[in-house]
Image (cartoon, coloured by chain):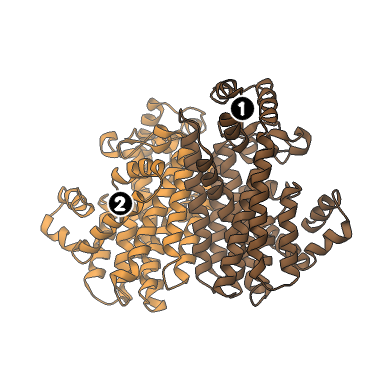
Chain colours: A orange, B brown
């Protein structure tokens, strides 16, 4: 199934298919070409990378970052040829971080599929990630607007710093507060989304103020996106999630609902004792879910996500009214509808 | 001890200190500044990276790649400001690959020091490597000559492909032949050395033919360097090596002397049976050493290294006769004297 039809199939579940299809009409052909191009790039690699990377690639994904690169480019002097490598590089970097994250989180399953390191081992996963990073920077080095490389290098740089902070926090005795959580998800997710929007605009020589507005949109949208993602890790059905719930808790990653509960729940000591356990069982996860539900922690997190999404939509106001802007507005709403 | 004095101390062991010091006189001040700059860059990182990367950084190393970047630059319109970030990026990429290699090789010790993953775990090592890669590409993105990024991305790209090939070979039933070995060390080492020389020249806008000559020099020198390095893994004293000998054999990495022995030794079946063992003991390594000594495999490898070094020196002939050229000539000889 092509990316675009995967989008449509998924989006078709929740709304008027015709309306939603129109959201992506503007970039559908080019996004399909990015998908084809990515497949071709991965086919050029050495055999071992072809296996590991294709596995990851075929597991799918929404290609959110390439889509945002293309939408960002629409606000400049759009030429697909100027932005294709940026869009592909964004997805390669995303894939690289997924492979390395799975080592770090010791995750066995992603998107319902066994992870690269579960199938091929840690060594293959380290190298596959490095290979994908290098491939991404090779592509970016050919982009005539030089600053695009720096923007994407900054993404990786910030993500690593964020992951390292998370790693350190997971081994600390004190639990993180809300600000630490927000800093972490900014580094982990929001900066990447923001820079994807900006890099597309930059490659097509959009005005600096336009680039900034797109960055602001992506940043706020990314914050909302990650909060919802963390929320789903505790509230979703395992079937929808493609893995057991509570994986963050089990990996000692304390997310927003838990932080809220630790401050507001009457059962905060019980919550804390579970959060600090070496091993967190499925039963413990269900207990945490009940405690947080009662404390209103899920509603709190949802409200914060909504604020970020609104901020994202406000950032779009200064941009030209064109189909790409309508699409970005709609994508911000999809975050809350848990469709992104 | 500063890099330059570390060089000198080491070089002082084998020859006339005054002569050898003059080899590096041309870049000594700037190389010392690269060292200071690297320390400063690593200090800017998040706490966890400061610990892991400083550990690696302080373990020392010859800063061969930054030195070659600076020497390469001498053949263009040398300005230290134009080449500083390239020199630093080359060392950061080298450090990143060392951290990731140590995970892949499950190495516990490097340069007589415990490795990052031995001290802080695999997760920290994955992230530290990624962080260093990203930092390197951040620096490179500010270099005004855009093609330098591509050259260094190509290095990482080729190295990963080479490591993956090595990884696959280590799990294959058939032992590699000489050509496969040469392809592997080219990807692992020679391309990096070659591109370091070229990237410096490129950043200082040397002529394309000059860049090519420097690339050719670095490639041949790097091939010689890696052959000698692999030779030392079997022939050196553990004390000089900073680790037990035969680590390649134990990691199922088949190097040139072993390949030679497998074709030429009368004890090739004994050699093959050791090379194919799951676990290779210290006694087995000593047996391999004796077999290879008798078969002339070490002399054969040394001869091949010498050929590469001669080729490296020949590549320098078309370059301007200046102190940097004399230094590169001397460095090629140091490869054979096992001082690089």
Q: Which residue occupies the foreground of this view, A324 or A248?
A: A324
Residue B238 shows in the view:
yes
Q: Which residue occupies the foreground of this view, A85 or A46?
A: A46
Horizontal and vertical percent for residue B316?
66, 65
**Disc 1 chain ID:** B
On whether disc 2 and disc 1 are found on a single subunit, the reply is no
Q: Residues within 10 Å of mark 1 (few under 14, many from 20)?
A: many
- In the displayed structure image, the side of residue A176 where residue A24 appears, left or right: left
In this rendering, the label closer to the viewer, 2 or 1 = 1
Residue A126 shows in the view:
no
Q: Is residue B125 above or below residue B308?
A: above
Of helix, strand and loop, which one carries label 2?
helix
Quarter assignment of residue A86:
bottom left
Q: Residues within 10 Å of mark 2 (few under 14, many from 20)?
A: some
Q: Is residue A340 above or below residue A149?
A: above
Q: Which residue is mark 1?
A: B265
Spatial CA distance of label 2 from label 1 is 46 Å
**Disc 2 chain ID:** A
Of helix, strand and loop, which one carries label 1?
loop
> Looking at the image, do the residues carrying marks 2 and 1 touch, with CB atoms under 8 Å apart?
no
- In the displayed structure image, the side of residue A104 where residue A92 appears, left or right: left
Horizontal and vertical percent for residue A320?
28, 77
Quarter assignment of residue B45:
bottom right
Q: Which residue is mark 2?
A: A39
Tag count: 2
User: Residue at the location (24% across, 63% down)?
Assistant: A30
Q: Using the image, tell me which numbered label, if any, was put on residue B242.
A: none
Horizontal and vertical percent for residue B315?
63, 63
Horizontal and vertical percent for residue B299?
69, 38
User: Residue at the location (16% across, 47% down)?
Assistant: A13
- In the displayed structure image, the side of residue B71 where residue B23 appears, left or right: right
User: Residue at the location (35% across, 47% down)?
Assistant: A229
């Amino acid at each position: 199934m092509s990316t675009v039809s995967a989008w449509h199939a998924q989006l078709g579940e929740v709304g008027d298919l015709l309306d939603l299809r129109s959201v992506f009409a503007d970039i559908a052909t080019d996004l399909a070409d990015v998908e084809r191009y990515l497949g071709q790039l991965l086919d050029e690699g050495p055999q071992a990378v072809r296996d590991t990377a294709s596995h990851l690639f075929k597991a799918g994904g929404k290609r959110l970052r390439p889509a945002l690169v293309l939408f960002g480019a629409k606000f400049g002097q759009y030429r697909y040829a100027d932005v294709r490598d940026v869009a592909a590089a964004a997805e390669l970097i995303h894939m690289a971080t997924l492979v390395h994250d799975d080592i770090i989180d010791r995750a066995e399953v992603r998107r319902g599929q066994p992870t690269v390191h579960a199938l091929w081992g840690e060594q293959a996963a380290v190298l596959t990630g490095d290979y994908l990073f290098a491939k991404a920077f090779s592509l970016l080095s050919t982009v005539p607007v030089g600053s695009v490389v720096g923007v994407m290098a900054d993404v990786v740089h910030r993500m690593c710093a964020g992951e390292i902070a998370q790693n350190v926090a997971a081994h600390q005795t004190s639990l993180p507060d809300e600000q630490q959580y927000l800093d972490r998800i900014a580094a982990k997710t929001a900066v990447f989304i923001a820079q994807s929007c900006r890099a597309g605009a930059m490659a097509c020589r959009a005005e600096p103020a336009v680039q900034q507005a797109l960055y602001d949109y992506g940043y706020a949208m990314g914050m909302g996106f990650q909060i919802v993602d963390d929320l789903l890790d505790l509230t979703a059905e395992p079937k929808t999630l493609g893995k057991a719930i509570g994986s963050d808790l089990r990996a000692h990653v304390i997310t927003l609902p838990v932080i809220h509960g630790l401050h507001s729940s009457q059962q905060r000591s019980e919550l804390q004792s579970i959060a600090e356990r070496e091993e967190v069982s499925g039963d413990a996860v269900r207990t945490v879910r009940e405690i947080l539900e009662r404390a209103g922690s899920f509603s709190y997190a949802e409200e914060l996500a909504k604020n970020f999404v609104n901020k994202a939509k406000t950032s779009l106001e200064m941009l030209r009214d064109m189909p790409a802007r309508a699409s970005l507005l709609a994508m911000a709403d999809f975050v809350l509808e848990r469709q992104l």
